[in-house]
Image (tube, rainbow, N blue to C red):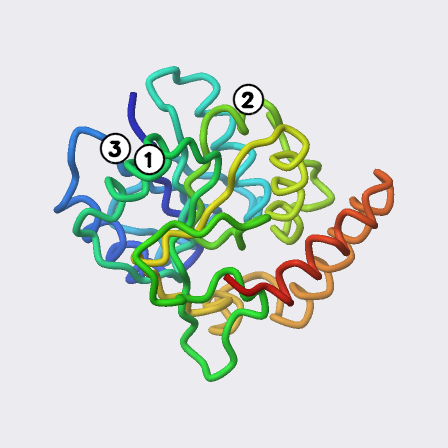
Amino acid sequence: MKTLVTILNHNLPEYTNFLYDELKKHQTESYDVFVFDNASSPEGKAKITHLATDENCYFGGAMNLMFDYILENKEYDSLLFLSNDVLLHGYNFVDTLRKEMFEQDYTILSPSVIQVRLEQDMWKQMHNYGTKNVRQVPWVDYMSPLIHRRLIEEIKQFDMSMIYGWGLDMYSGIICEQKGWKIGVVDYLTAVHLVAKTTKEGKADITPEQYFQLAQSGMDNFFSTNGLDNEKYKMMALAQNYTP
């Protein structure tokens, strides 16, 4: 069994190529590296593409397609889903996440995250607290999550009202809480998030303002329609007030 590492590319080929090379040159038998092209222009495609869509299915739609892929391919026990606006060092990155996941029985794991701006992630569980441990948390921001197959088999597909990506992470946290499954942040492993790089560079089909509005309304609609508003607000409060 191994991890399928998926890098999501949309018109940022230099960043996708960096991530692919960084992970590929340190690849072990424990994972495969896969590039998903999300309807990039011809000049926006990475040097290697394993799966491509003709229409932009955004973060949520791409994750759903990779959930399908995992369910159809039994050799994978987990999915590491990477936005291409994430920077990391490939040395032992995947193997470290895998080791912690399977030795300590986590269902979702993430590296800690630093953002390239003065304002850091508002979800404080994602910060680096300088420990040598995995911190158990209620949910992780989905910038670079390693997701165990059991959660994929449980969810199967996220509701398409969350196609823009917001809310997938908190909903996953709610499911894990219901199932008694652990979620963690590996404090001694760090990734850098460039934050909405594609939209901010004008390489997406919507502006950053449109994206934020659509992502927020889609998330709110899903949780409200499914009677999960209280759970959503609980997850938000836990993350905003988090202390290790």
- Of 8 and 131, which appears nearest the observer? 131
Q: Earlier in the sequence, mark 2 or mark 3?
A: 3
What kind of residue is marked 1?
His
Q: Earlier in the sequence, mark 2 or mark 1?
A: 1
Q: Which residue, as the protein is rendered here, is positioned at the far bottom?
A: 118
- Secondary-structure class at tag 2: helix
Q: Quadrant of residue 18?
A: bottom left
99, above or below 41, in the image: above
- Secondary-structure class at tag 1: loop
Separation (CA) of disc 3 from disc 1: 15 Å
Q: Which quadrant would the N terminus be assigned to in this image?
A: top left
70, above or below 80, in the image: above
Q: Which residue is mark 3?
A: 31
Residue in view at x 62 percent, y 64 percent: 206
Residue in view at x 22 percent, y 30 percent: 30
Q: Which residue is mark 1?
A: 50
Instruction: Give me the disc on residue 153.
Output: 2
